[in-house]
Image: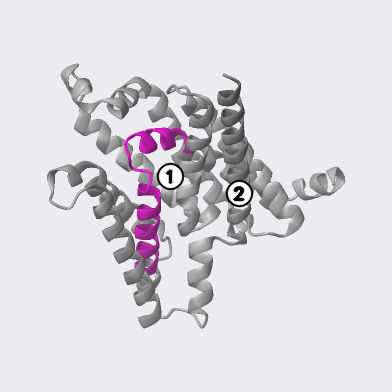
Amino acid sequence: MIDTLLFYLDFPFVRYAIIVGTLISLCSSLLGVTLVLKRYSYIGDGLSHVAFGALAIAAVLKVTNNMLIILPITVTVAILLLCRSKDTRVKGDAAIAMVSAGALAIGYLLMNIFSTSGNVAGDVCTTLFGSMSILTLKPTDVYLCIILSAIVLVTFVLFYHKIFAITFDENFARATGVNVNFFNLLIAIIIAVIIVLAMNLVGALLVSALVVFPALSAMRVFKSFFSVTVAAIISVICSLVGILVAILAGTPVGSTIVAMDIVAFLICYLTNFIRNRRV
């Protein structure tokens, strides 16, 4: 097995997949704890459906670089959901569910009406559940992922304490002088960027797993905001193991990574259960 892994690691596309998978998993897990604690766990799923709808629009318009369409639309919707839903009659989970279902339906409708290939069902399935596209990345895709991931990581480190404050109590954070609206806007933009990047890794329907599972796993064992760091470690390990298993076994990369996240969650859950029984 070791020899087989070393053989595959000689190929650039495998190294690209590992780099991109690690960076995306790291970034998605950092904000996972914040979104779970703010009761926005479903935002990843909703935005991934929006990104799917935007991808359909880009395909219909035959845009060469679909990121020019997907990223602005996803960021705009993320801002509306995370920053404006509190001031509207349609709030929180209802707004996310409405946008999620609507974007998914419109995207599929557009891909059927303005079919750009002879295998619409295959294209939709690939986009929703991921494919081996993570193993066909180009150097430009890797560079773009590195740049955007670096921006996300630096932003999170610089504003860690502010994000911590608005995660637990926005009113208290506002009273201490924190610009809550700005940092909610920042979180919305970051999570939208992460969702768009993660679609290439696991597909639209599985994106939320990268955000939620590592956070929930870490929170089973640790009860402080420090679990953000633990969640990042769990996510990176699951991503690496998932990619390597997918390469060796020939399984879908996205589904394999999510399966590893589920295993990690079960381990953390059992660890917490055993520890509580001993107390």
Assess disc 1: are there few (<14), some (14-19) or many (≥20) residues with their C-alpha within 10 Å of its C-alpha.
Answer: many
Of 240 and 12, nearer the camera is: 240
What secondary structure is found at the residue carrying circle 2? helix
Disc 1 element: helix
In the picture as drawn, the residue positioned furthest to the top comes out as 176
* Residue displayed at 37% across by 49% down: 42
The residue that appears at 55% across and 25% down in the rendered structure is: 276
- Tell me which segment is drawn in magenta: 29-57
Reading the image, the residue beneath label 1 is 194
Q: Locate the C terminus and report the quarter of the image it occupies.
A: top right
Q: What amino acid type is highlighted by mark number 2?
A: Ile
Q: Which mark is residue 257?
A: 2
Asked if the stretch drawn in magenta spans residue 31, the answer is yes
Q: x, y percentage for residue 251?
A: 68, 59
- Residue 202 in which image quadrant: bottom right
Magenta stretch encompasses residue 26 = no
Camera-side mark, 1 or 2: 2
Instruction: Indicate whether 194 appears above or below 206.
Output: above
